[in-house]
Image: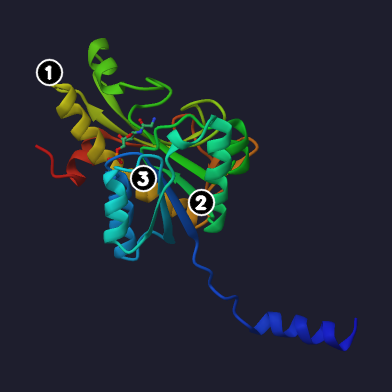
């Protein structure tokens, strides 16, 4: 060992690591109410990191305004200007990389992602979906749940893999479907639950508690059950002051 080695080792022992802020890029296509829930947590220093950019494929997405109002870089990348899905995702990767994110958060980003995009962010990309996965993958989840007459519906946060809405689930929140439920009322209840669980899942990831390992999603080193952690209807209703 040289003197220099010795010195640097010693210094490493006594110098605290600079606490690096974990960086989040959020992708949206619409209203961005989930984005808002994340911004609200950030405002109260409870997110465990910083949203450094919001990117929308839809120029009119209201979420862009929410980002600007919060002083967050808001980027429009319209998919219609690209000739293929692959070309768009390539451009999206370039924009994302400029922001050097630790985590990509899909918050109502209504696009099917190419395998190359998913592989690039494998293990560091989360999505929220309006159903208790694996039930009702895809679109129109509330209408389909009502048509089936299910007693229970909800939402899920999951890691994104190449299987659409099929990656390992992290956390779910339940909604008990009322006898007089309409698509609108169900959507509103699910949305409120999304705003509860998404910031929690993001925080867990940023704190290093939530990981995607070879055997699936883990929380504090323990494998998560197939449907992730569950927030019951009763707990969510209490949290939300619902009737
Ligand atoms: C949310 O309900 C989210 O679960 C859904 O889009 C909505 C976006 O709302 N995502 C999907 O359906 C993805 N498959 P927001 O723009 O108000 O956050």
Which label was assigned to residue 110?
Answer: none
Q: Which residue is at the front of the view, 33 or 239? A: 33
Q: Which residue is at the front of the view, 232 or 36? A: 36
Query: Which residue matches tag 2?
Result: 103
Residue sitting at x 37%, y 20%: 136
Residue sitting at x 30%, y 44%: 32
Q: Which is nearer the N-term, disc 3 or disc 2?
A: 2
Q: CA distance from mark 1 to mark 3?
A: 27 Å
- Observer-side mark, 1 or 3, equals 3
Mark 3 Cβ and ligand 1 under 8 Å apart: no
Q: How is the image coloured?
A: rainbow
- Residue 98: x percent and y percent? 55, 57
Query: Which residue matches tag 1?
Result: 179
Circle 2 crowding by C-alpha within 10 Å: few under 14, some 14–19, many from 20: many
Q: Can you say which quadrant of the picture contains the N terminus?
A: bottom right
Q: Relative to 130, is 12 above or below?
A: below
Q: Can you say which quadrant of the picture contains the C terminus?
A: top left
Q: Residue furthest right?
A: 1
């Amino acid at each position: 060992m040289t003197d220099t080695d010795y010195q640097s080792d010693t210094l490493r022992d006594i110098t605290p690591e600079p606490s690096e802020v974990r960086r989040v890029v959020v992708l949206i296509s619409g209203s961005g109410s989930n984005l808002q829930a994340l911004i609200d947590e950030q405002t109260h220093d409870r997110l465990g990191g910083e949203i450094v950019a919001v990117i929308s494929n839809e120029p009119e997405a209201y979420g862009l305004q929410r980002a600007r109002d919060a002083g967050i870089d808001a980027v429009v990348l319209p998919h219609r200007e690209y000739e293929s899905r692959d070309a768009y995702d390539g451009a999206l990767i370039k924009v994302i990389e400029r922001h050097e994110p630790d985590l990509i958060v899909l918050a109502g980003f209504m696009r099917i992602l190419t395998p190359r995009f998913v592989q690039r962010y494998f293990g560091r990309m989360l999505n929220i979906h309006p159903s208790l996965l694996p039930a009702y993958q895809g679109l129109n989840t509330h209408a389909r749940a009502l048509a089936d007459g299910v007693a229970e519906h909800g939402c899920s946060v999951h890691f994104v893999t190449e299987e659409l809405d099929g990656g390992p689930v992290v956390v779910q929140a339940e909604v008990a479907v009322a006898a007089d439920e309409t698509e609108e009322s169900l959507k509103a209840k699910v949305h409120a639950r999304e705003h509860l669980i998404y910031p929690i899942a993001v925080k867990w990831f940023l704190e290093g508690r939530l990981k995607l390992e070879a055997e699936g999603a883990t929380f504090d080193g323990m494998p998560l059950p197939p449907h992730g952690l569950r927030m019951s209807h009763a707990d969510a209703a209490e949290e939300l002051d619902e009737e």
